[in-house]
Image (cartoon, rainbow, N blue to C red):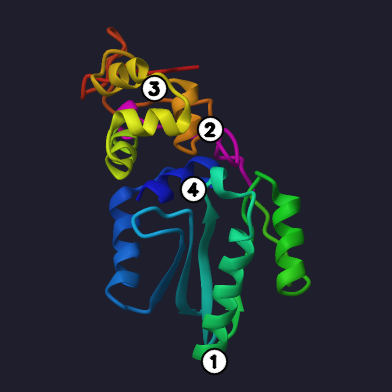
Amino acid sequence: MELCRALHAENGMFTMSEDKVRRMLHRAFDKQGAIVGALGPSGHIEGAIYLLISDYWYSDDWHLSELFSFVLPQYRKSNNAKELITFAKRCSDEIGIPLIIGVISNERTESKVRLYQKELAKPAGAFFVYDQHMPSAFPPRKIYEAEVRHMLEEKCKEVGGVGAWCRANKIGTSVVSLVLAKECPPTGQIASALGLKRELWYESKKSDSANGHDANGDRLRTA
């Protein structure tokens, strides 16, 4: 889920439903017509690709549809993105059905298209977004402070504690401890270390604008 949150923070066009994302992930985990390929050592995912066995509305022919292919920012100076495409191509060859991959993003779009064109073939069309009913085709990601704290807690557990994580990311333990204790909001440095954009936005559906806190007691950051 942490990787999916980071993916949405960078490329999400609409709001994220964590329940829906979990259900989609479990389709792969439960072998219900979907595949997840992940990179990185055990317990530490650097990137992943999700492939869904699907069909078009006018045909009974199956194909592999890529729902996402994402590498966390701190692991992009590598062949990870290329390896995910190679994995998808291997799945296509082994299953014996075509692979369809697309790019819907305003982040490094040209470089992504160049990579896919090099590894696959020339694009077979294009996507367009009519955003009259959106403030932006890719609005700023809205993240709860609680969500960032949860990601921070999980990262600290993975490496053996707050001290170890702080040393690895060259961040003061006092700052991280204050964030985890809800005594201050997550900083841009922490967000960057978690693979999130530095410009974080916090929003609550049931916010208390009078005191600037949401329903869970988290401070809200607004424009």
Residue extending farthest left: 216
Frontmost residue, 92 versus 56 = 92
Label 1 belongs to which residue? 96
**Residue occupying image coordinates x 59% and y 79%:** 89
Principal SS element in the magenta part?
Answer: loop
Image: 206 above or below 64: above
Task: Report the amino acid beneath label 4.
Answer: Leu
**Residue occupying image coordinates x 49% and y 36%:** 196
Q: Earlier in the sequence, mark 3 or mark 2?
A: 3
Q: Earlier in the sequence, mark 2 or mark 1?
A: 1
Task: Report the amino acid beneath label 1.
Answer: Gly
Q: Earlier in the sequence, mark 2 or mark 4?
A: 4
Label 2 belongs to which residue? 197
The residues tagged by marks 4 and 1 sit, at their Cα atoms, a distance apart of 29 Å
SS label for mark 2: loop
SS label for mark 4: helix
The residues tagged by marks 2 and 4 sit, at their Cα atoms, a distance apart of 11 Å
* Label 2 CA crowd tier, 10 Å (few <14, some 14–19, many 20+): some
The residues tagged by marks 3 and 2 sit, at their Cα atoms, a distance apart of 12 Å
Numbered circle sitting on residue 7 = 4
The residues tagged by marks 2 and 1 sit, at their Cα atoms, a distance apart of 39 Å
Where does the image place residue 8, in percent across and percent down from the top left?
47, 45
Residue extending farthest top: 210
